[in-house]
Image: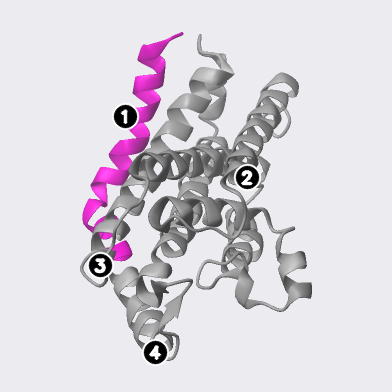
Amino acid sequence: MNWGAIAAIYRFEMSRFFRTLMQSFLSPVLSTSLYFVVFGTAIGSRIDQVEGISYGAFIVPGLIMLSVMTQAISNASFGIYFPKFIGTVYELLSAPVNFLEIVLGYVGAAASKALFIGTVILCTAAFFVDLRIAHPLAMVLFLVLTCLSFALMGFIIGIWARNFEQLQLVPLLIVTPLVFLGGSFYSITMLPPVWQTITLFNPVVYLISGFRWAFFDTSDVPVGLSLLAIGGFTCLCLAVIWWIFRTGWRLRS
C-alpha cells in the first residue's frame, strides 16, 4: 500500500476545504438554525412530541443525515470530476498507484469534510434542543459509514458525469427527495399503512432510522436491517468502482 500517495491525494483535496473553511463552517450553522426556526418553531408548536421525543430533538438525526449525504456526494464527485475535466486524471492513472489508493485518497477526504459538517450541525443543534445520545459509539459508527458510503457514491457520480450539470443531477433529483421522504422530519409510523409499506422501499429510511436509534433508542425499522443496508450499499459502491477502474469506463478518452 502506497501510503505516501494516499496522503498526497488526501492533503491536496483537504487543502481546498481549508481555503474555504469559514464558508464551510458558517453554511451548516446558518442552515441548521434556519431549519430549527422553520421546523422546530413553526411545526414544533403544533407537534409537541414524536414517539415521546420533543419534535425539535427528533429532527436532529434527519437534519444531520441530509447534510452529510449531500456534502459527501458533492465533495467526492467534484474531487474526481475536476481532474477528469482538465485532464490531470491521466497523470494520476499512469502513476504507480492502484485504484484502491486513489479511492482512499479522494473518498477519505470527502468523508472527512462530510464528517466535519455533521459534527458542526450536531454542536449547533445542541444550542437549540436538549440532546442525549443513548448509544454514542453506534452514532459515530452510523455517521462514519454514511460519510464513507455516500462519498463512494459521489466518486462514482464524478466519473459518470460528462459536465458540471450532471454532477448535481443525482443529489438534487434523487438523493435529496429520498432523504425528505425517508423520515428525516417525521416518523413513518405517522403515515397511513399503505404509505408506510411504500416508504420501506426507500433505502434512506434504514439509514435515518438506525441513526435516530443511536440518539433516542427508538427506530422505525430494526437496527440490524439498518446496518445491513448501509453495509450492503458500501459494498455495492466498492464493486462498481472496482469495475470502473478495471474496464476504464468513462476514464479513457
Label 4 SS: helix
Which residue range is magenta in the image?
1-29
Q: Say whether disc 3 or disc 4 marks the residue closer to the N-terminus.
A: 4
Q: Which numbered tag is attached to residue 130?
A: 3
Label 3 SS: loop
Q: Which numbered tag is attached to residue 90?
A: none
- The reply to whether discs 2 and 1 touch (Cβ–Cβ < 8 Å) is no
Q: Residue at x 43, y 91 (%)?
A: 46
Magenta run includes residue 77? no
| Mark 1 or mark 3, whichever is nearer to me | 3
* Residue linked to disc 4: 42
| Mark 3 or mark 4, whichever is nearer to me | 3
In 3D space, how far apart are the residues under numbered discs 2 and 4 (Cα atoms)? Answer: 36 Å
> From the image, which quarter does the C terminus lie in?
top right
In 3D space, how far apart are the residues under numbered discs 3 and 2 (Cα atoms)? Answer: 37 Å
**Percent x, y of residue 10:** 37, 29
In 3D space, how far apart are the residues under numbered discs 1 and 3 (Cα atoms)? Answer: 36 Å
* Residue linked to disc 1: 11
